[in-house]
Amino acid sequence: MPQDGAPQSGPTDGQDSAEDKVGIEYVVTPEDGAIVNGPDQVKVGEDLAFQVELEEGYAVAFVYANEEELQADHTATGSELENSVAYYYLEDVTEDTVIEVQLDGAMALDLVEYDIKPGMEQSEINEVLKSTDKEEVIVQAGDYSDKTFSVADKTLTVDGTVTVKGLSLNNATVQGLHEFIFPEDATLEMEEDEIFEGADKLIVKQDKGVVRINGDVEITEIDLQIRGDGAPYSVLWSSGTITTNHAGFSVEGSNVSSGYGVYVQNAVKGFTGNNSYVSFSNHKGKNESGLVVNDEASINFTFELTNGIFKANNNGLNGIQSSNAKTGQTFIFIYSDVETSGNGTNKGFTSSGDGFSYGHYKFVSDGSNRLVMNNNKGKGLGGGSSAAAGLYMEGYTVEANGNNSIGINASKPMIGYDEIVIKDCEIHANDNSTGIELSGTANISDSTKITAAENSTGISFKAPATVTNSTLNVNGNRTTGIKNVSELRLEDSIVLDDGATTAYTGYAGSADGTAVMILSSEETVVTLNGSSDEDGDGKLYYKSFLGEYKGDIQVQNGSLQASSPITYPAYAQVLAGGAYSPKMTKNPINTNGTPVYRFDLHEGYDHGTLLKNAGDGIWSFTYLDGETPVSYGFRYNESGEDLDSGAGNAYVWTTVGTVSYDATEGAIASANTATVRENARFADDVVINGGGLNLSERTKPEAKKDGLNFGGWFIPADGQKAAEYAAAGNWAALYEQLDVRNGAVLFDGDVPVDGSVTVYAKWLPINKYTITVNYLQWSEDGNHQQISDSVLLKNADGTTEWTEGDSYDVSGDEALKKEISGYTFRNMEGAVSGTNMTGNVVINVFYDRTPSTPSGGGNGGGGNSSGGGSVVTPGDRNPGPGVMIDDGQVPLADIPEAEVPMSDSPVLIAEEETPLAALPKTGQNQTKRGLALFGLLSGISLLVFGSRTERKKRLF
């Protein structure tokens, strides 16, 4: 029966059929907060009445009937609590209806018995916290910013937001009063307050004070924010462990006086975080780091975060500073987003400024997490002048861009592993000094894709490495794509190298068993079969990058011309008999499978019966294919001279064919062995020697186009479509066909088996650069001060934009010297001369302050200001090109490793005032260097968490 005063449903008739009734369903959230009394069926067209009986501490937030809100008809007073029952009435029910009752636990707040409340004196708070009869202390929300909480051997429970001046934790637990679930969709771009919206918070705002942590401390279901400036460190962690669960633990600085974030001492065991946000950022004091685990910390210190977010950004020195001496310190991130960017903002002259410095690092994910290490003044991951960092990386998307030194620098395996491991990762290491440097034995595998572009060096292997089923893209580096190869084994992998390397040539393979290798252009001997003097000629044939690999080799960017200093990759058996057993190469060397054979010729040896002169300059060579002798004919050189006359070029047989060259929007600049057609856009290269191809004579033509660099000849992804686009002048569509990502291949000079191919020219932009001159007062401590406006140097064309490949020379002291009142010229530093420009140039001109009082024409901000100006001609001293200087608004360039306050308005010296001798420009194709700056994006969506209805069992 309904309670007194409740509205009644209309009369029912037991004879009505089920078709005349509609169903009623009741849903209560949270389900244990109330009981709903009402019928589960009513007749069609009748009214529905039901009541909501509330549990202690709950109130009705809203009630919906099929998503339309209902208002309570009236309430009745219960025997123990007021407003414990609410009544609702719904007229004329004609369909199945869902009644949703949403409850609010806010009434429970008034029933919490608080131990600490706003307005209490420090002595009263101390007495509560020191009490031995309380294992849990509950703090009411409020401002305690003039109070310090010292919590030992008990639980501190925070309701709402509590702000304190200081905090000390000793074998303590800090928790929120209400349940908080760390959101699965939290991202690196989100701010802490967005992630913890609605959560209980404990905010520590110490002023030159220190938060002290001792013993085992647990932080759960609360956002603990520590904000500190000015002290040597914000948190002194002396001993024990820290465990976080569904919590935030952030230690943040805000200005240049901020000390270390968290300083770890020897008795500390480690940190374990689950579903947590952890941040040690913005500690901007000089040489101050976010998390400091240095020589004072234990060698066995371990930091581990699972399903969380970690940030250590914008610190004065390093994000994480581990010890180079304590080699067992480890940092493990499992399914967590990690960022250590922008560190080194206030580092010392000789300091690094790394994201991760030293230590062992393990990152494990399934492809859903990011690791970002951008724009650090030192390395993204590494440490000091040596790598000194262990690494295991699996399933991460990695950004290591724009670091002043190395993007990723690892020297040893992660503890527990035999080698550096990088598997199933996508890595971008661009615009660093070196993209990736591995100086320990390494294994890269499982479809890893590495792009290392716009660096000086793309990837440096300083120890043996194996690359399996992966791609190394080192296109577009300024000096070298792959460098310092000790022993590189590549299996079913691809190397993309656009020829910007100086020491290595890139080769590409496929997943069908062909291999990939890097061939040294120095005097390194590269073979496949061992490291012994197998042929008795006194030369050692060193073990190749491929070891004992027996697969075929496929060439993409290499020369097919034999020469004596290099032993080419060989797949062959050492022949028995005779005084000399040549090394052989059996290569389906064309990408389309045309068979070509390669071998080396050595002068001065009796080749025995294995080599036979077949006449007309053709020789026959017999080798073993397995156990079957095979005769192979070849031509030693065009004239057919005797083999013993000296080592030289070898001619090999292949299919007859024609290569047609289309310069697209450019023109043929140098035909070489090709023949130019009437239209200079086109050329053809035809096979010679009556069915054989003289590879040593084949030299691809070059193309040119004003304002662009020639990027090479490419075989399009779809030859038929490419021909249609080229005929129609649809260059944008054609260039899509020439993109290697769409299946295009850089043409290496091979002729396809079908006898013909058309290749197309690709064009690359020419970079523009500036030469900036800064005038500075010399300081022994490196804190040089600007004493006159910076200037930009003009080229021979009278502009301040220098073209990639230009040359310049201002190396004489007099070339840029100018009189500055009160100062005496000292010296110049920087690249005062150069050929083949590949980037912006900064020259610093240093002066010493004179003791006399300045007078005359200078005002400290410029040089001579009289007349029509002066002329400085470095060409008078050496017959090279000169440089002009001009007035104007000049953006100041960064001064390397010096902290110099720059003027906001630098001025150019007018062209008519200071002309320098003209310099001729020189051009050379170089790879573009771009600046890949990663901008952190602020979160743009609010996370809406469930209302705070789940509560801990502490209500009274």
Image (cartoon, grey):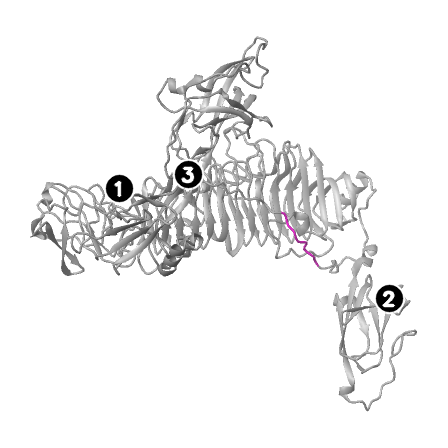
The disc placed on residue 931 is: none
Q: Which residue is mark 2?
A: 84
First reached walking from the N terminus: tag 1 or tag 3: 3
Q: Give the Cα distance between marks 1 and 2.
A: 89 Å
In the rendered image, which quarter is residue 89 located in?
A: bottom right
Q: Position of residue 732 (x, y in %)?
A: 44, 53
Asked whether residue 54 is in view, the answer is yes
First reached walking from the N terminus: tag 2 or tag 3: 2
First reached walking from the N terminus: tag 1 or tag 2: 2
In the rendered image, which quarter is residue 726 located in?
A: bottom left
Q: Amino acid at mark 3?
A: Ser
* Residue displayed at 38% across by 25% down: 881
Q: Is residue 18 left or right of residue 320?
A: right
The disc placed on residue 524 is: 1
The disc placed on residue 456 is: 3
Q: Which segment is the magenta one?
A: 938-945
Q: Give the Cα distance between marks 2 and 3.
A: 74 Å
